Image (tube, rainbow, N blue to C red):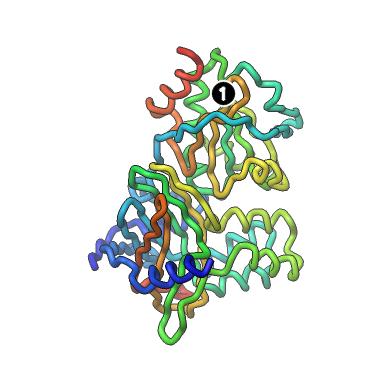
């Protein structure tokens, strides 16, 4: 375990910086960042606070619970295996870095689940929440991909770098999306 | 950093969050993550139990489908790739009509009204059964980690292939793989 942790620390600090493509929706101003490196494609698209609120209100969240999630910096996240060998993904290995903060892990689905239970969110709404988040773990065969939400504790309009990690065979790889920006309240 | 200004990013986000109602007027299909057309073959292993009711309250039991090849797709209406791949699942189902093939769509956590509101928007309503996994227990038994996930079960009740993420199910490669299982 110690060796793995040390390996990940080394990965986060040495995350490969492949080209990041950015596109902006001319209509809404919401942005997408995408990078491809060594058989993996990672793509994050801003989700506005209004979109996050509306999605969870429509699935049975209370206004308070929906606001709790919408207060985060939420992105639609896509990971795709574009290589020719299986890759293993573990969201707990990812880290995000914003100014003045140490590297942070993405809040897990299990942690959210505990919070929603405390807040009395109905089971059906919690099920929708769980499956709408990006998978905690996954093995992507060539051609496989997943899409789901990831949430970051970064202020509106704030920027951060995302270090993502994956395994292929016995090797651990990492990559980086730089200067991701949280959607504004008015996006 | 390369900046490509095009109508895509936010439209995608809107689609991802809200599905068709918000997305229909702003999403350009070319900007969505493309559907794949691969199946990952695996060493045959017995499929977990699957016994669920459909939208009409009829029970479907995978164990009673021995002798047929079964495509099992786990999905939800709010899952954008699930929505996009469903018409191709219907086309596949129609292409293999009359053969020893069954498609089952297992919905996660939603009710019949919600599902009906989605399927009524499709050009062709699904003719295959849509099953209700209300508490996502079947999904967990099948060790699904993300939606959509699809399994191909052979005539002996064994999982022989899987697909994670949206697929174009009537793509020739997938049809060929199923026909090979059907022995044709």
Residue at x 68%, y 47% (from the top left corner): B109
Residue A51 shown left or right of residue B110 in the figure: left
A31, A26: nearer the viewer: A31
Residue lying at the far front in this picture: please name it.
A3
Residue at x 40%, y 68% (from the top left corner): A163
Classify residue B39 by image quadrant: top left
Where's the C terminus of chain A, which quadrant? bottom left
The vertical placement of A169 against B41, above or below, is below
B176, B17: nearer the viewer: B176
The vertical placement of B120 against A111, above or below, is above
User: How many dots with numbers?
Assistant: 1
Residue B133 percent location from the top left of the image: 69, 41
Q: Does residue B124 appear in the picture of this structure?
A: no
Residue lying at the far bottom in this picture: please name it.
A100
Residue at x 57%, y 27% (from the top left corner): B153
Q: Which residue is mark 1?
A: B154
Residue A166 percent location from the top left of the image: 42, 57
B182, B53: nearer the viewer: B182
The vertical placement of B95 against B45, above or below, is above
Residue A143 shown left or right of residue B144 in the figure: left
Residue at x 43%, y 67% (from the top left corner): A7
Residue A115 shown left or right of residue A28 in the figure: right
Classify residue B103 by image quadrant: top right
Callout 1 crowding tier (Cα within 10 Å): few <14, some 14–19, many ≥20: many
Q: Does residue A108 appear in the picture of this structure?
A: yes
Provide the secondary structure element on which disc 1 rests.
loop
Residue B165 percent location from the top left of the image: 47, 44
Residue A67 percent location from the top left of the image: 62, 72
């Amino acid at each position: 375990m110690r060796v793995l942790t040390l390996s990940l620390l080394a990965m986060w600090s040495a995350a490969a910086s492949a080209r990041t493509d950015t596109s902006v929706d001319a209509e809404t101003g919401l942005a997408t960042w995408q990078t491809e490196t060594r058989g993996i494609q990672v793509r994050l698209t801003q989700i506005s606070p209004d979109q996050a609120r509306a999605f969870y209100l429509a699935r049975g969240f209370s206004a308070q619970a929906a606001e709790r999630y919408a207060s985060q910096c939420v992105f639609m996240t896509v990971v795709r295996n574009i290589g020719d060998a299986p890759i293993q993904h573990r969201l707990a290995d990812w880290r995000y870095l914003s100014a003045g903060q140490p590297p942070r892990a993405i809040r897990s689905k299990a942690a959210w689940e505990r919070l929603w239970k405390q807040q009395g969110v109905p089971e059906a709404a919690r099920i929708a929440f769980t499956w709408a988040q990006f998978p905690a773990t996954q093995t992507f065969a060539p051609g496989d991909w997943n899409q789901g939400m990831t949430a970051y504790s970064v202020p509106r309009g704030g920027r951060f770098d995302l270090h993502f990690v994956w395994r292929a065979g016995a090797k651990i790889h990492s990559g980086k999306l730089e200067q991701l920006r949280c959607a504004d309240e008015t996006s | 950093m390369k900046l490509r200004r095009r109508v895509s990013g936010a439209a995608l986000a809107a689609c991802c969050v809200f599905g068709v109602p918000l997305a229909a007027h702003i999403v350009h299909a070319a900007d969505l993550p493309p559907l794949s057309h691969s199946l990952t073959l695996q060493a045959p292993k017995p499929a977990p139990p699957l016994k669920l009711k459909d939208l009409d309250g009829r029970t479907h039991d995978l164990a009673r489908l021995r002798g047929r090849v079964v495509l099992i797709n786990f999905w939800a209406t709010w899952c954008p790739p699930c929505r996009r791949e469903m018409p191709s699942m219907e086309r596949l189902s129609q292409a293999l009509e009359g053969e020893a093939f069954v498609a089952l769509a297992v919905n996660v956590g939603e009710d019949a009204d919600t599902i009906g509101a989605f399927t009524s928007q499709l050009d062709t309503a699904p003719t295959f059964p849509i099953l209700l996994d209300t508490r996502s227990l079947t999904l967990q038994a099948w060790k699904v980690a993300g939606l959509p996930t699809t399994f191909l079960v052979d005539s002996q009740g064994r999982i022989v292939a899987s697909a994670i993420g949206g697929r174009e199910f009537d793509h020739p490669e997938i049809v060929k793989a199923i026909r090979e299982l059907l022995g044709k």
